[in-house]
Image: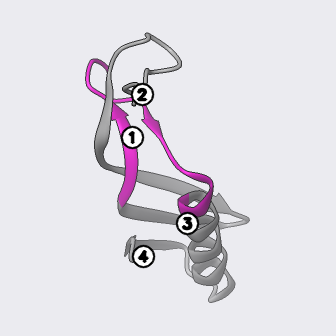
Amino acid sequence: MTAAKCPLCKGTMAAGTTDLTLRRGRSVVVVEAVPALVCQAYGEASLSAEVSQAVYALADREASRGVALEFCTYAA
């Protein structure tokens, strides 16, 4: 199996986590500890389609509650 390469710098990507800040209307949702492949040189993160969908659904749920700013931790 070939190691994943960063789409920006072609450096090595490794399993890790990242934090994402998403804006939904007037709400800002920060999702922490999101699993991702992370560039070891620059920290660029790449999410799987499954994780992306889960993060967007979480942000939508939190924003629908009418929060202005919400911090959440990713849970599979």
- Other residues around mark 3 within 10 Å, as few (<14) / some (14–19) / many (≥20): many
Whichever of labels 4 and 1 marks the residue nearer the N terminus, that label is 1
Residue located beneath label 2 in the image: 4
Q: Identify the residue at image location x=43%, y=21%.
A: 5
Q: Identify the residue at image location x=43%, y=11%.
A: 10
User: Mark 4 touching mark 2, by CB under 8 A?
Assistant: no
Residue located beneath label 4 in the image: 76
Residue located beneath label 1 in the image: 37
Closest to the camera, between mark 4 and mark 2, is: 2
- Other residues around mark 4 within 10 Å, as few (<14) / some (14–19) / many (≥20): few
* Stretch in magenta: 34-51
Q: Identify the residue at image location x=35%, y=14%.
A: 11
Residue 55 got which mark? Answer: 3
In the image, is residue 48 part of the stretch drawn in magenta? yes
Residue 49 pos. (x, y %): 62, 54
Secondary structure of the residue carrying tag 4 is loop
